[in-house]
Image (tube, rainbow, N blue to C red):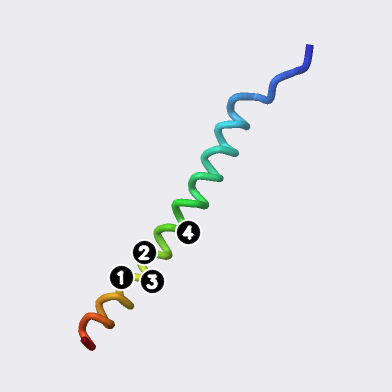
């Protein structure tokens, strides 16, 4: 029987993966909002 990975380790890996994706999304939004506001302001 193969040993399954510890739930804690899997949870940490999943959390880090989701946190990294959400962090990239937040940075993209924070960078896109000011650019969008400026572009609309110029129009």
- Mark 3 and mark 2: Cα distance apart in space: 5 Å
Q: Which of marks 4 and 2 is nearer the N terminus?
A: 4
Q: Gap in Å between the C-alphas at discs 1 and 2?
A: 6 Å
User: Horizontal and vertical percent for residue 14?
Assistant: 55, 38
In the image, residue 3 sits, relative to residue 41, either above or below, namely: above
Q: Quadrant of the C terminus?
A: bottom left
Distance Cα–Cα, label 3 vs label 4: 11 Å
* Residue 11 shown left or right of residue 40 in the figure: right
| Nearest to N terminus: mark 3 or mark 4 | 4
For residue 29, the mark is 2
* Label ID, residue 31: 3
The residue positioned farthest toward the front in the image shown:
43
Residue placed under numbered mark 1 in the picture: 33
Report which residue position mark 4 lands on: 24
| Vertical arrangement, residue 43 with respect to residue 18, above or below | below
Quadrant of the rendered image containing residue 1 = top right
Relative depth, front residue between 5 and 32: 32
Q: Do the numbered discs 3 and 2 sit on residues whose CB atoms are within 8 Å?
A: yes
């Amino acid at each position: 029987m193969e040993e399954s990975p510890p739930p804690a380790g899997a949870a940490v890996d999943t959390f880090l993966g989701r946190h990294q994706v959400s962090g990239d999304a937040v940075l993209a939004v924070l960078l896109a909002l000011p650019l969008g506001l400026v572009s609309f302001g110029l129009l």
